[in-house]
Image: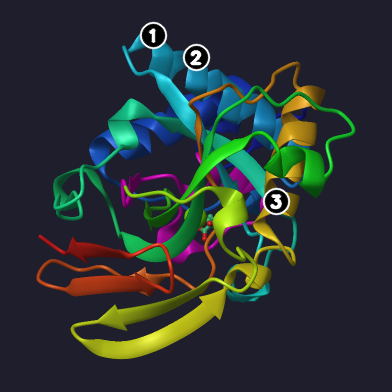
């Protein structure tokens, strides 16, 4: 964990963590830390992420689950980062179906379709496989993540985005879930429509071949940090397609084959 000198600031875990939350609170973006602090690697990013989870909890937020980031080729190629990673979901990020994109809290929101798991059982790594991970899942849901980055134009490297809680903003899921064995999750398709026009589609296989792989990756990563995935937690397995812009006035529909649809208006 290094200390980086920029013309006006010294960055380390403590100052970078505080700066990221200040950017979130003040709705301002900034250049990635790695421009001046190249030693900010993924491990240091997780330390910053966990530091800010402690601060979110101190502010009264509760952990409701986790999210995976960059688990699909579409997302990895667009963001120029090939490492999948894990971040935290709190109740402050949860939307109720019908809520608009919370523009008043976000800097430059984008929306992406997600396959969402609600956990029935606790899952502890290391050594979790996709198969053992799926055995702990209660229901699968259609979901949407509203991502937001504290970095200008979403320009970041792996350490920056991990530190920034993987561009967390808000999320919503269709409450009608299916048991994982009731349908083929890899073949589940989503069609993304913006203002009633088709823009993109993908299947569950886009998520590391099967979203269970993403869940296993999360369990094994959290084990490294001394934690497990708890019963009742929500798991966003990662954007299936590239995210779409979500400005005020837009209308976004994510239509899944078996899991129903999620609608978000830009507010
Ligand atoms: O800003 C980003 O796209 C990084 C977060 C990735 C979220 C995802 O892949 O689901
Ligand atoms: Mg996502």
Foreground disc of the pair 1, 3: 3
- Distance in Å between CA atoms under marks 3 and 2: 28 Å
**Nearer-N-terminus badge (3/2):** 2
Q: Secondary structure at mark 2?
A: helix
* Res 157 quadrant in image: bottom right
Q: Are marks 2 and 1 in contact (CB under 8 Å)?
A: yes
Vertical placement of residue 233 versus 14, above or below: below
Q: Residue furthest top?
A: 58
Q: Is mark 2 within 8 Å of ligand 1?
A: no
As for residue 73 lying within the magenta part, the answer is no
Q: Which mark is residue 58?
A: 1
Residue 19 spot, x, y in % from top left: 44, 32
Residue 141 spot, x, y in % from top left: 43, 52
Local crowd size for mark 1, using a 10 Å CA cut-off: few (<14), some (14–19), many (≥20): few
Quick check: 95 left or right of 191? left
- Distance in Å between CA atoms under marks 1 and 3: 32 Å
Vertical placement of residue 252 versus 215, above or below: below
**Nearer-N-terminus badge (1/3):** 1
Split into 4 quadrants, where in the image is the C terminus?
A: bottom left
What residue sits right under mark 2 in the picture? 54
Residue range highlighted in magenta: 151-175
Vertical placement of residue 42 versus 194, above or below: above
* Res 41 quadrant in image: top right
Q: Which mark is residue 212?
A: 3
């Amino acid at each position: 964990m290094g200390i980086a000198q920029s013309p006006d600031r010294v960055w380390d875990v403590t100052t970078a963590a505080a700066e990221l939350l200040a950017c979130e609170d003040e709705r301002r973006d900034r250049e990635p830390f790695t421009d001046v602090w190249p030693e900010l690697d993924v491990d240091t990013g997780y330390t910053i992420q966990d530091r800010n989870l402690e601060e979110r909890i101190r502010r009264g937020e509760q952990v409701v689950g986790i999210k995976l980031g960059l688990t699909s080729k579409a997302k990895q190629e667009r963001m120029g980062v090939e490492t999948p990673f894990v971040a935290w979901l709190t109740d402050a990020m949860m939307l109720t179906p019908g809520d608009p994109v919370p523009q008043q809290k976000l800097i430059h929101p984008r929306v992406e379709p997600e396959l969402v798991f609600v956990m029935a059982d606790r899952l502890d790594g290391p050594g979790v496989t996709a198969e053992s991970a799926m055995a702990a899942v209660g229901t699968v849901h259609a979901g949407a993540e509203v991502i937001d980055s504290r970095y200008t134009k979403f320009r970041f490297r792996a350490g920056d985005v991990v530190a920034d809680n993987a561009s967390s903003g808000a999320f919503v899921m269709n409450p009608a879930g299916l048991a994982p064995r009731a349908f083929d999750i890899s073949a589940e398709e989503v069609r993304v429509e913006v203002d009633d026009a088709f823009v993109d589609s993908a299947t569950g296989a886009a998520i590391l071949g099967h979203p269970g792989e993403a869940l296993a990756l999360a369990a094994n990563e959290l084990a490294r940090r001394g934690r497990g995935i708890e019963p009742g937690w929500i798991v966003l397995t990662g954007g299936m397609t590239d995210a779409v812009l979500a400005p005020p006035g837009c209308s976004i529909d994510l239509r899944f084959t078996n899991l129903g649809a999620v609608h978000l208006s830009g507010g």
